[in-house]
Image (cartoon, grey):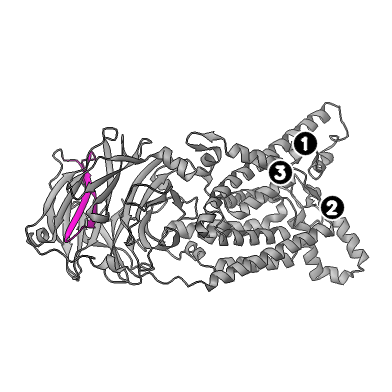
Amino acid sequence: MIAAIWLPAPWAWSHLSFALLVAAVAAAGLQAWSLGCRWLRSRGGSEDADGGSVDQMSESLSKPGRGIANRPLVLLVVGLVLGFLPVGATDLSGHWLAYTGELSFPTLAYLWLVTLALCGRMTDRSSATKKAEERIAAESVTATRISSSGAIRRTLAARSADPPWSDSRWPERIVWLLLGTLLYTTALSGQGPDFYRWGYASTPSWLTLLAAVGLHWAGRWDLAAIAVGTVLSWQLRLSGAVNFWDCAIDPLLVGSSVVMLLGQLVRVIIRPVVGATDHRFYDGDSAAGDKSPELA
Amino acid sequence: MTDRPNAARRRFIVIGIGVATVIGLWRELQPALSEPRVAPIALRSEQQPAPAGEPTFIVSFLQAVPEAPSVHASTITRLTGGDLLAAWFGGSREGAQDVAIYLARWDHSQQSWGPAKRWIDRGAATRELGREVKKLGNPVLHQDPAGRIWLYFTTVSVGGWSGSSISVKHSDDDGGTWSAARRLITTPFLNLGTLVRNSPIDIADGGVLLPCYHEFLRKYGLIVRLDRDGRLVTCYAMNSGTDALQPAIAAESDQGLVAFYRRGGRTAPRILSNRSSDGGATWTPAEPIVLPNPSSSVAVLRRHGDRGGFLLAFNPDEQRRDRLALAVTEPGGDWRVVHTFDPVPDGTESSYPTLIRGTGDEYHLTYTWGRTEIAHVRFDEAWLERLP
């Protein structure tokens, strides 16, 4: 009975995966188009209120507008509709998913965050920091407290809504990379410990839930939500996968983490460190820079 | 960031953690997964062997299909009433996009095969699975103790055979109507590389142990454990090294299994074998046995009766697939080649055998005959007993 109820779940999951992919790619494309147009206008000497400087262009990422490029739900619906377009014996999403397989929950969450960030549905992080400082001042928090666990939590919280492409997310990328390496090498080698098989048991889900509690405490609400969503998607068999790791990680996530880490590494190598800014967390993001947005 | 959204997020996550914890605890309260135990039917016939009389040894051929000049990888299972159901893939050539899986039914009362039906092609598989399928591969038929017919088959969406995955359909009316296909997710890397070739073994909880193999990067055996509804429960690695594929398994006891593998291209030209004493959860390292193997599929079957012993169908050559032979062994004994089937006149392939037990003391063997036809051999214990 339960199986009959949940039969459509993997089908819905597949279409949602495709729709989120389309939404993220479309948001990136529209944003690039918009920035390119403004840059051309500024080069042509016809600066307007929106397109006068690079700072303003970057800032536009954190300002929700009225066009389709700033409406993530519209882009998602467009993705859903495109996914149902019949192509041959199946639809467009079926062709795409033949190559990507079922996407994991974290990938879907990151794709949605990418769409949100590109659509300007995140507020500027500097303003969030300013508000946090005002709150701290209002609460008469002492410097000592700020520098202890409160500072850690505040720092983590400030990072919590950085866009998915931000360099500040390097620790989670390392986690995906290590997890993927461990999983794929043991599962595909046919020898040694079978780490993938461990995913049929409930232990990894409990550990992930524990991590969610920790992340929630630390103020990393986005990662906490991803962890909880991963566990729920596995428990409810939303993607059809029985193995926890199929819900927690996929090659797209590992691959994009590798590419971003390599890019970050190259930037660190070729660019001299300037000033005392905490580059580990806040620097090096060309798109966001000092304007890394915070979710509204 | 304002306080209100923050509070909402906190609440949302706390609720999520709570729900996940409750579901997790509920799942923990369910009966734990036990080591698989072989179903009695896998160990002994449900019918007593018929008294030894005139030996039976009859060779017939399944009806050819003009649209599928190249056929391969047959599989067979019993139906109720003594009928049989066979499946194989056919098309212009192996791996072509026009390859479909065909079904044919053996009428026990007529003692003959009915016409072959095109059962599923890549278009139908694409529609049913909701994703592009480029080609179809090995099918495996199996009737479970409840009488439901299962058909596991290989589909390829990306690349060659190493890009395969396994799909499954079932029928509750002896193959009259079939459920929609669904995929089994068996590997973490895009679910690539898992194929099926040989028949599963029924286990006591109503599920099966389906022998599969992996071809992506490395070649190794894999047991996929399915429940009575065909849902994947877990997978067991078969410790077969990295150059063994197409495992064929048989039960030695309620938790004792033996597996025989086609060797890959890098190891000695011998059939590989290993054993499990815990229902397939763990396996001894695979070792070559005395029988040769030209990198071709083998089939193994526990014999009728309670005495144990196995039948093995294989190609008795290190290089060529032109002959097919039958070997027998008694418990604890050595393999003895008892029969070699007539080769195809033009010296082409006789390969990819499938063995099942029939009614009474009969056995059924199907195999690829020259890649143009599927041969069916009926023989019985009396025939086996008379062999030297």
Q: Which residues are magenta?
A: B347-374
Subunit ID for the residue under disc 1:
A
Marks 2 and 3: which is nearer the front? 3
Q: Position of residue A138 (x, y in %)?
A: 93, 65
Of B168 and A169, nearer the camera is B168
Number of marks in the rendered image: 3
Q: Is residue A220 visible?
A: no
Residue at 40 percent across and 50 percent down: it is B169
| Image coordinates for residue A235, horizontal then vertical, percent | 57, 62
Structural crowding at the residue carrying mark 1, measured as other residues with C-alpha within 10 Å and reported as few (<14), some (14–19) or many (≥20): few
Q: Are marks 1 and 3 on the same chain?
A: yes
Q: Secondary structure at mark 3?
A: helix
Disc 3: host chain: A
Q: Amino acid at mark 2?
A: Ser
| Mark whose residue sits in front, 1 or 3 | 3
Residue type pointed to by label 1: Gly
Of pointers 1 and 2, the one earlier in the residue sequence:
1
Marks 1 and 3 sit apart, C-alpha to C-alpha, by 12 Å
Question: Which residue is at the front of the view, A228 or B318?
Answer: A228
Badge 1 marks a residue whose secondary structure is loop
Q: In the rendered view, does B23 fall on the left or right side of B52?
A: right
Does the stretch in magenta take in B309? no
